[in-house]
Image: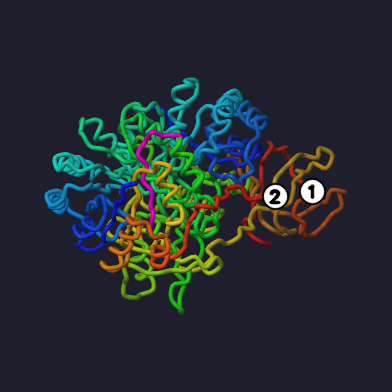
Amino acid sequence: MKKIELLAPAGDLERLKVVLLYGADAVYVGGEKLSLRANATNFSLEELKEGCTFAHNLKKRVYLTTNIVFHDKDRKGMEEYIKEVIDCGIDAFIVSDLYLAKYIIDNHKEVEVHISTQDSITNISSAKFYRDLGASRVVLARELSKGEIKEISSIPNLETEVFIHGAMCTCFSGRCALSNYVTNRDANRGGCAQVCRFAFDYDSNDKFTLATKDLNMAMYIKDLIYIGVSSLKVEGRMRSLYYLATVIGSYRFLIDSIYDETLTDEKLLEYQKRLDSVANRDTTSQYFNHLADETDQYYTGRQEVSNQEYLGLIIGYDEKMKSIVLKERNYFKVGDEVEIFTPNGEIYPYKIETIYNEDNEKIEVARHPEEILKLPFDTRLIPYSMIRLIKKG
Amino acid sequence: MKLLGVIRDNNYLEYLDNGLDGIILPLENFAVDYFKYYSISNIRECRKSTDKLLYIVLNKMIFNNELNDLLSVLKELESIKIDGIFFYDLAVLNLIRENNLSINLIYNGTHMVTNSDTINLYYDLGVKGAYLSNEITKNEVLNIRSNTKSDLFILLLGNPVVAMSRRNLLTSYFDNKNKSKSDLIPIKEPKSGQEFLVKEDSNGTTFFYNKRLNLSNVYKELKDSGINYGIIEQGDYSSLEYKELINAFVNFDKQRIDELAGHNRGFLYRETIYKVK
């Protein structure tokens, strides 16, 4: 049985490297044209080429999201752009528009076409339609139950990709233009202003809200593997390095442990807790076990909470000082208990006893984000290792 | 341009007599985003009672457990000799092709019918009509018209559908607030002042723009360009007012249409943005 794919988002080249190093099998990115995250830092052709080379050296894959619902004027230069990004080395396009899907299928056999969740594929018949068109994979609608996913995943010669983690749309993907009407930003061309997270006036005493909690499928990875899903997708091209490292690293561990048959209930709970710790909203499994209901929604205005446990990114090692060098992200101080974690899954519990600044002067408190600091540590760590707070001192 | 009505009361024959060229009937259990739905037997009755155009809406997302019923209703609709089906989910197209059913199809992708190439591809796949999105400009409409052979349908007057969710958002909201449920509420986004109607039924929740779209100012231009069908929704108009509206389109009286429907021209002259610097 082919091992299930862990598919991660990346808003830029650094995120691409981080998610691949932390265990993603493939990464999806947006280019400078045709992507539904028009406001993400999308990849230039040079960056795309570098990203593909980096991924391919690790025997991993890169998918390009070209999933806007285009208007006639967006059509200009489309063929040239498709050719240019193929030349950069991408492995697949994630496409929403039927014309664009067919165009790539007919003209570029060297790449795969995956049909975007924007097309809200909810049944076997429409999935077969895309397979017969030549698509190799469909990204399923987020509104499906376990049984529905299983049935669609049983279609021969068609891969299914399922979202497992991250923010949810309230409405069917592709069937929402709230952003267009409230902000004049085009939801289906990458301008979505997330109006479903706004609070609306309903009556004089109350606000009407329609925002959903986030998705977290850690408890159901085993089910998704056994029902025949091909790829597990994490949402969030604009998320932080720390969030991506933690989420991808956690799912990598869970998937590998399931295949190795070493996953214990204790470990599953530990990783569920870790995933919850980086979330800025509550999470549920949404439609997987039942139709989404009142427990999957929010009823207050803003729902996000900021997360301050990410303390810094390790960027090097000072041999002379025998210290790791890090770029600070959030406040910490002497006495704090932290964990240092690496892309290959190593975790080092660590109590902060000494902090040096860039001039090798001892300081008690790190309070300036982006400041370069050093912490005594015997071992050089691989790039993109990070530090998180466990307990304040 | 032929005029098609979406009716909320039971007087469709009167409206057809009044000048509508046909009506659009949302099929119960298989259509969303409407206020009145019709059973197969209702549709059969309509067919018997008029030779005018009868289009059926079948625009919900289809789930696996609905596919058998979907095929059955498609076969029934073929036997009724309706003039076409507005569809969203590609399962409809796929089942019609797999079963060699002879039914005229209109692609009703709501917000996704925005360019000529895609409409032309659908045409090549046997879908001979497209219901244009309400969120494109007049120039885009005209450009599409000049670049496709497909029959084009446009909403001339009515409340645009803004969003559709599988969630029972009103049930959840009122449950949470411990209040008695309403299936239809108005809401307002406070900063922009934009108002919406939120309606829930057994298929989920639909958001309508609570300001009627009225394309009277470009009606003649659209008609002259060759847009084939214009849709006029009854909405909350009384029977009398709706007849007046139909008359005002048939004997084109822009002033009267505007008196009855206001001046919201939607996105005709307002291009949406999608890159925010």
Residue that appears at 67% across and 30% down: A46
Q: Is residue B200 magenta?
A: no
Per the image, label 2 sits on a secondary structure element best described as: strand
- Colouring of the image: rainbow
Residue that appears at 60% across and 23% down: A87
Left or right: B252 as drawn, with respect to A87: left
Residue that appears at 32% across and 35% down: B127
Which mark, by number, is residue A188? Answer: none
Q: Within the image, what quadrant is residue A382 found in?
A: top right
Q: Is residue A201 visible?
A: yes
The quadrant of the rendering that contains the C terminus of chain A is bottom right
Q: Chain of mark 2?
A: A
Identify residue type, mark 2: Gly
Dot 2 alpha-carbon crowd within 10 angstroms: few under 14, some 14 to 19, many 20 or more: many
The quadrant of the rendering that contains the N terminus of chain A is top left
Tell me which segment is drawn in magenta.
B147-157
- Residue A300 on image: x %, y %: 49, 68
Left or right: B21 as drawn, with respect to A134: left
Query: Dominant secondary structure of the magenta stretch?
Result: strand
Which mark, by number, is residue A372? Answer: 1
Per the image, label 1 sits on a secondary structure element best described as: strand
Along the viewing direction, whichever of B196 and A312 lies nearer the viewer: B196
Identify residue type, mark 1: Ile
Along the viewing direction, whichever of A70 and B176 lies nearer the viewer: A70
- Residue A254 on image: x %, y %: 47, 41
- Residue B7 on image: x %, y %: 26, 59
Is residue A59 depicted above or below A378 in this figure? above
Q: Is residue B152 magenta?
A: yes
Residue that appears at 40% across and 46% down: B223
User: How many marks do you count on the picture?
Assistant: 2
Which mark, by number, is residue A312? Answer: 2
Q: Chain of mark 1?
A: A
